[in-house]
Image (cartoon, rainbow, N blue to C red):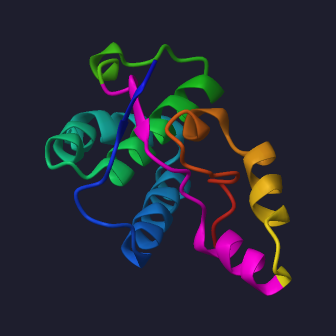
């Protein structure tokens, strides 16, 4: 059973900017250069140690997703972090806005079904990391 973690800093639009930045890095670098960069910078551990769990889990989920997509074994150095997840699902702001506009939770339910498994593992609802402008 996973232990659930709360972020030291509350969720904000800054996380949306962070996600966008990571997705743009992936697009600009390509999968393998991105993986190497993430591993060299060691930001996953840095975020974890600062209790910045949204960022830590997002980056680790991205690393795991790209590894799966390229048939690369997972980096076992982060296994101790994979035991955790966020307390509540984190939806993109666009999904939250759509729920408000429609006055129902159908967009959330759909996004959970379409979620990339590596992100869902950490309770981060993310369906598309490659479609950035």
Residues drawn in magenta? 81-101
Relative depth, front residue between 70 and 50: 50
Whether residue 88 is situated above or below residue 3 in the rendered picture: below
Which image quadrant: the C terminus?
bottom right
Provide residue 99's location: percent of width, then percent of height.
76, 75
Membership of 82 in magenta stretch? yes
Identify the residue at image location x=52%, y=17%. Answer: 72
Where does the image place residue 19, in percent across and percent down from the top left? 47, 61
Q: Quadrant of residue 121?
A: top right
Look at the picture and state if 101 lies above or below 68: below
Q: Residue at x 29, y 20 (%)?
A: 80
Q: Residue 101 vs residue 28: left or right?
A: right
Please identify the quarter of the rendering in which residue 118 is found. top right
Q: Residue 44's x, y, as percent?
A: 27, 40
Quadrant location of residue 98?
Answer: bottom right
Q: Residue 91 magenta-drawn?
A: yes
Task: From the viewer's side, name the closer residue of 67 and 126.
Answer: 126
Which residue sits at x=44%, y=57%? Answer: 22
- Count up the numbered dots: 0
Residue furthest bottom as drawn? 101
Q: Give the percent coordinates (x, y) of residue 112.
A: 73, 48
Q: Nearer the viewer, residue 34 or 92?
A: 92
Compared across the picture, whether 50 is left or right of 76 comes to left
């Amino acid at each position: 059973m996973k232990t659930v973690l709360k972020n030291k800093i509350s969720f904000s639009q800054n996380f949306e900017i962070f996600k966008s930045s990571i997705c743009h890095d992936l697009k600009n670098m390509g999968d393998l250069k991105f993986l190497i960069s993430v591993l060299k910078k060691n930001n996953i551990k840095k975020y974890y140690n600062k209790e910045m769990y949204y960022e830590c889990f997002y980056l680790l989920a991205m690393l795991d997703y790209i590894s799966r997509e390229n048939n690369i074994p997972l980096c076992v150095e982060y296994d101790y972090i994979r035991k955790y997840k966020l307390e509540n699902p984190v939806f993109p702001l666009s999904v939250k806005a759509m729920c408000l506009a429609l006055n129902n939770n159908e967009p959330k339910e759909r996004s959970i079904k379409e979620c990339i498994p590596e992100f869902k593992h950490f309770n981060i609802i993310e369906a598309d990391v490659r479609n950035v402008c």
